Image (cartoon, rainbow, N blue to C red):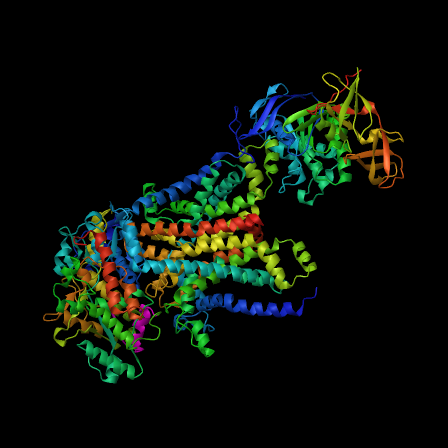
Amino acid sequence: MTAVAAPALPKRRSLYPGWFYAPAAAVYSVLFLAPTLASLYFSLTRWTLFDATFIGFDNFAQFFREPFLVQGLVNTVIYAVVTSGLKVVVGMLLALMLTSEIIARGYLRSVIFFPVLVSTVGVGITFTVLMHPTQGMINQTLAFLGMAGPGWLVDPRLALFSVALVDVWKGVGLATVIYIAGLVAIPRDYYEAARIDGATKLQNFFYVTLPLSRPATATVITLSFIGGLRTFDLIWAMTKGGPGFASDTIASVIYKQYQAGFYGLSTAGNVVLFILIAVLVVPLTMFLNRKQGHE
Amino acid sequence: MAGLELKNIQKSYGSVEVIKGVSLSIDDGEFVVFVGPSGCGKSTLLRMIAGLEDITGGELFIGNKLCNAVEPRDRSIAMVFQSYALYPHMTVYDNVGFGLKLARTPKDVRDQKIRNAAKILKMEHLLDRKPGQLSGGQRQRVAIGRAIVRQPEVFLFDEPLSNLDAALRVDMRMEISKLHQTLSATMIYVTHDQVEAMTLADKIVVLDGGVVQQVGSPIDLYQRPTNLFVAGFIGSPKMNFVEVVVEAVNEDNIMVGSKDVARLGVPATVAGVKVGDTLTLGIRPHDLSPATNGAVVGRVSLVERLGNETIVNIELASGIPWLAVLDGDQALRVGESIALAADPAKAILFDRTGQALLAPIA
Amino acid sequence: MKRSRASIIGGSAAIAATFVVFVIPFLFIILMAFKDRQQSALRDFSWPTGFHLWDNVFEVVRTRNWMMITAFVNSSIITVASVTLLIVFAAMVGFVLARRKTRFNGLIEFLILAGLMIPPAVVPTIWLLQGLKLFGTLHGMILIQVAYNLPFSIILYRAFIATIPRELDEAAVIDGARPFDVFFRVVLPLLWPVTVTNIVVQSVGIFNDFTNPLYYLPGNQNATVQLTLYNFQSQFSTAYNLLFTNILLITIPPLIVFMFFNRQIVAGMTAGAVKG
Amino acid sequence: MTKTKLFALMGASTLGLMISANAVSAQQSGYLSFLIDNGPQSVAVAEAWVAAYTEKNPDVTIDIEVRPGGGEGDNIVKTRLATGAMADVFFYNSGSLFQAINPTQNLLPVTNEPWQEGVQESFKSVVSAGGEVYGTPFAPAMGGGIFYNRGIYEELGLEIPTTWEEFMANNEKIKAAGKTAVIQTYGETWTSQLFVLADFYNVLAAEPDFAEKFTANEAKFATSPAALRGFEKLQEVYEAGYLNADFGAATYPDGLRMVATGEGAHYPMLTFGIGAIAETLPDNLDDVGFFAQPGDSADSNGLTTWMPDSVYIAKSTSSPDLAKDFVGFIGSPEGCDIRNEAVGATGPYMIAGCELPSDVPPAVSDMLPYFQEGGNNAPALEFLSPVKGPALEQITVEVGSGIRSAADGAALYDEDVRKQAQQLGLAGW
């Protein structure tokens, strides 16, 4: 409504020229959109890389017949919910700590943020060694304290959560920094007003901090939820979906089909993942943004 | 130097018409103020002159050149923005010189022009600072400096003083006025503040709803507003209005009255007015004075005693609130009734459509 | 300034906890890189019996015909070039997208969101790169990184540009600037805080990317640092000292980025992410 | 001129030192790229060949490129072949995986090259397609069976088992002695398949036409009792508690170390593991023995064998003659000698004239009788049928860790296999 350039008789060049889109659009459409659209066709074929036979929706039917896919689907959602949930809670707590009058703030912020920058493969390998059931440092320390450590990555009930934990370890620094930014942006007046109204620290948190840091929460959730749904590197570096299929997510299932040379099937999996993401993330973003607008 | 000619200028966003055909001519060297309430289209009109908004219909001439499709940089205009719009990453020197740099002015000429502008605005000592280190008034100077350094033929000001505090606003107002005298360039100035309009303008253009209500000199607008809107908008405090009924139509005046106002013969154009018509009577608060047999009677509801004058809020019999500005200090009590005399020569009558029935100038 | 006792106790507890959780894993990597093969095989948190770091580094760098050197050169080229292009392209899009409202905006926003969400289709992409003669080349890889990371950069920029008053653009236009000047001389310099965020996030992401080079950049002469880790993983499967030396080596560039931009990261986040 | 001559002389003198059937081959020049997998054995032997070859042919440059092994490596090979970006010469599997890379379209046939005369027919059959031979063996044949620690066997006075019952009895005694009876290393999932794959000799003994029926979608793992046994054996060793404590996380090198040093008694594996033990634990090489995976009857005890991987030439190569010469060099007795030198002998060669050194490690000498006249051996299923399900290693991990029962695992694998058969476009699926 504000500044729509209505069709005018003599038109001047816009201050915001459309060709500014051109370089980005060229790269993006050739290297991302075109292959993605092509994949929609290939998902309907039996594809050997050498030739593609059109088989309709057989790949999708096959994909849903995969006995592990249902588990992979559930795992993907669990993983995304657990990692983004923990990142929100832990990130918020760490940010509260780091914006309070605490000693060694610089050090704390640095050590919490640094893992964000480290190679995922490197982190995966390191934690695979640390989480080794008998020789890993974690379980050896627990044994030293007289506790029997679990089989972090080899217990089928635990493996997915162990990887999720490492994901949180690596990613919580980003959530924390986003929250710090959000908390710093809350005007002091609100706290002072609340204090005059007699709010306790806890009430301060629930009635001032939490609602006013909603934009930060929205950012953290959206980023880590999409990241969680697409996650692949870390799972691949740590468990390759194992033991068995216990920590398979859709992304790793797709990858395994791809590895096995089932290119059409794998591409169909891509489409399924996309649909899952769209179905979960679009309403989530809309929800988060609507609330934001109300504030 | 150049004048401007606007011919039936229109602007619409989709189906929403914002400027509904404005025609206006501005002489070379004139100081013109666009005034009106917010949303009246005055800023849009200014931005169309600047070239920041496309013109949907009509023609814009700057110095005899049709400018509808001319880029802003080729219109020889400069503009001062409400928020000053200084480039935060550049020093004052670079802010002022940016336009010259873009025009590829040689470095030494540029330097001389920048220093000259700084001298005019008394801000030589600020040249090395960044905008973030300046006060509001200083930023305003820089913004003006940026405009004058390019020696444009037309200056455009978009509410330049509204972000300043009251005292500074008065100072800057005088500075701009002086600047106009010094540069004798055409200036178009947008404001919603009618005091600024009255003090600065050679010519005021009152806009409302995308339509020009009246164009004229400040005093003309004050004394002879052509309609209810202009009458209410120009002058402070606002003109008082009340509905009256025509009791008699004479040769050069109309006798009106109501339960609020006793019979009053107001000079006016009498054509078409019949006895029994309802008109609106307007009297400025300054044109009322206390008198035991005054035509206007009401009850005092609030008294503001300023020493040199007294502002009295009164409630007429029909409950309409009026204001009166009385000379000197008047000891009035809230609740007491008061009678005020009105100078009929300064009163104005408006018809049902809001048009003023002004008496022809003698 | 007197600090309360609670803040000192709380601080100390926080330091101890973060030390265990965040610092020890890195110390573990460093200690392993100092050890010899026998000691590292124990995979415990112990002090190295001798100083073997330089031997290990030399061994890792020398492996497979000095592949590590090639890898560092390649990764640096890819990272610098793609981040530069990303910043310019994304800022341009973010600028026009934030400023100019047309009926295409909805479509563009959709495409950006799609880019964030849709997992790239690898094989069709390879097939396409091959047709463009870009498969297995550094510039092909650079363009891939640009394409895949554009959406995130655009979102950061658009949110930030929305906070820059439009009057600045207009002032520049009145000053005689062409759109090109408005963008490169007025807007782009103002985007510095969010540009820093972009540089940090994207350079680290691209430098650490492992999957994409694995597919689009085959061949020894094209190795990137993450691939060295992967390639050496099985070769070093019994030599944990070398494996961890490798991890240590490829962690150094992100560490440098971190040390340079640590202070600006929060500023950039405030500017870019939260106001979105 | 003089320079070339000098090089020629040097080349000739080097040649003179080597007793080689290929000694007469002409000097070569040019450039080759050579793609190998990243196993330490492959790297070491490839480097040795390239060094020897370029010493003979100083004008030749050969660049070794390394790719990951396993499924990821398969992917890279397929992708690069499909896009015409394959190295000139590369290592890859024979048998069913060879069939999956569309050899007639992507590879250069070597049927009539001189060195092929010395290659055994049984090998040629697993690297042939459309009547042409494409591959040359670059490693010895392998057996799939069980490595055992000779020290433990001696200490506990155990006999080499010839039936599964005897094997389990041995395990019980080893467990009773407080030792790890069976080593499993699911940290690298491919190692979990051995109990199933190495049981194939026993499957064939019970159902000689299993492979044909399997390919034709008529026989299934879940419904054939003999084929199901492999999964059941995996389940049995888990349920009896014979496994090492860290079976879920241990890796292939861990497994070899454990069996070599006596941390565990049995490790089901392919015999190429001998090379790795020779490299990393040379002192323990003599402590490792080998026997075929026992079946249910002592009368039919035999070894499941694997054809070696092969070296291929990509059709896209720009110097086919040089590539052929280099591959011929690898496939010559001289190549075998260089291999023996570089990584040790791990089994019988498929090339005439290739000899094993006299002092082979015990695990190798344990294996040789199965290959000799009167010995019992049969190829693994993947050399008799193009159908191999990609998820077998995950399924065997599940069965071997008690997550899934043998019957369920076998049924799941049959489902997995169907996909592969459909992808290959086989009739009857």
Vertical position of residue A21 compared to residue D181: above or below: above
In the foreground, B35 or C5: B35
**A237 sits left or right of A8 in the view:** left
**Which residue range is magenta in the image?**
D250-269
Say which quadrant the N terminus of chain A sits in. Answer: top right
Q: How many marks?
A: 0
Vertical position of residue B51 compared to residue D49: above or below: above
Vertical position of residue D88 compared to residue D158: above or below: above
Q: Position of residue C184 (x, y in %)?
A: 54, 38
Q: Position of residue A3 (x, y in %)?
A: 55, 34
**A123 sits left or right of A49 in the view:** right
Q: Residue furthest left?
A: D374
Vertical position of residue A113 compared to residue B326: above or below: below
In the foreground, B316 or B47: B316
Residue A44 visible, this angle: yes
State the image quarter where residue C2 is shown. bottom right
- Magenta includes D265? yes
**C60 sits left or right of D294 in the view:** right
Residue D32 visible, this angle: no
State the image quarter where residue B268 is shown. top right
In the foreground, B278 or A52: B278
- Magenta includes B308? no
Q: Position of residue C8 (x, y in %)?
A: 63, 69
Q: Position of residue C15 (x, y in %)?
A: 57, 68
